Amino acid sequence: MLSVPAFTAPRKLIRPLAILLLSLAALSPLGAHAQSPVLEKIRDSGTIVLGYRESALPFSFADDKGQPAGYAVDLCRRVAESARQKLGLKDIKVRWMPLTPQNRFPAMVNGLVDLDCAPNTNSPERQKQVAFSVSHYVSTVRMLVRADSGIKSFEDLRGKTVVTSAGSTGDRHVRHLKQQYGYRDIYAKDHGESFLLLESGRAQAFVMDDVLLAGLRARAKDPSQFVIVGPALSTEQNALMMSKADPEWKQFVDQTLASTFAGPGITSLQKRWFQQPIGSRNINLALAPSSQVREAWKHPSDTATE
């Protein structure tokens, strides 16, 4: 009987061959995502769960038809499409979950949401609970007041009532400065309720990210009645938010955002939500991207705000 000797690769080919096989495995849908529980779940269910805000225009809000819309929402849609392509899915279903500044953290920690599509401020303290993507925008914390209130700075708030949204970055500043400036503080469940308290006169100032304040002012019955004043209390690195338990998912999200920022699409996206009319009321924030925003796009980073 004629025996055929088994083929043995020459020693010099073994290492390149092994590298090639590992590379091919990494390119396959299963090999690429075996380490990511979120991507595995998306592949198995065909569904991605995205969180959003109902009143954080222009980042994340409910539009005229009650559907999620905004700059951060569109970025999340790009992540969903990238996941569909990577996983080789014919379709991907997006399930939207409305969140508030207060309940977003439990939703992340408990795995109820795969990605939160909002202007979440990345901070060292918050990183103990959740993970953040590279920054998608940069804003500053200031305050919104009535134009005829005479309020220009925090010194003018003594004896007055200041509102912010519970669990937001504004929450931290309002609590910290209360004793120094002698004002009363109240906390609303979300940004829409905070603005309503200001609009109705139950609060004289609303502390929050300036872009969000501009969005809320633009939606008012008479935007000219409100002005953004005061010093910048902090610079906020706005990011998408996710669970800390899946670093591979974070890497995938970061890569998708970095790819988006490197292309011409990010300029169109910014113009759509910050410099053009939005919705049936034609709300236009008329906000061009700052040098800090352009820097965040040019050099993507997940560095936290101190």
Image: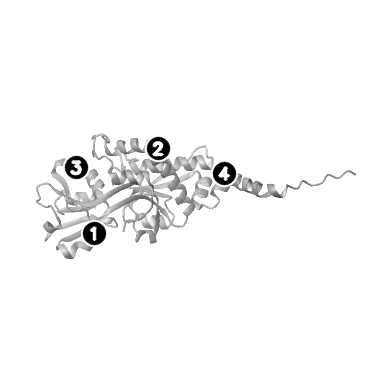
Q: Amino acid at mark 2?
A: Gly
Distance from disc 1 to disc 4, alpha carbons, whole Å, reads 46 Å
Tags 4 and 2 touching, CB below 8 Å: no
Q: What's the mark number on residue 263? A: 2
Tags 2 and 3 touching, CB below 8 Å: no
How many numbered marks, from 0 up?
4
Q: Earlier in the sequence, mark 4 or mark 2?
A: 4
Looking at this view, name the residue that lies furthest to the right: 1
Distance from disc 1 to disc 2, alpha carbons, whole Å, reads 36 Å
Residue on which the image places disc 4: 27
Residue on which the image places disc 3: 220
- In the image, what residue occupies the spot 12% across and 46% down? 147
Q: Earlier in the sequence, mark 4 or mark 3?
A: 4
In the structure shown, which secondary structural element does the residue marked by tag 1 occupy? helix
Q: Nearer the viewer, mark 4 or mark 3?
A: 4
Q: Amino acid at mark 1?
A: His
Looking at this view, name the residue that lies furthest to the bottom: 179
Q: Is 111 situated left or right of 214 in this image?
A: right
Distance from disc 1 to disc 3, alpha carbons, whole Å, reads 25 Å
x, y percent for residue 243 = 43, 55
Residue on which the image places disc 1: 173
Distance from disc 4 to disc 2, alpha carbons, whole Å, reads 23 Å
Q: Earlier in the sequence, mark 2 or mark 3?
A: 3
Q: Is 146 situated left or right of 48 in this image?
A: left
Q: Nearer the viewer, mark 1 or mark 4?
A: 4
Q: Nearer the viewer, mark 4 or mark 2?
A: 2
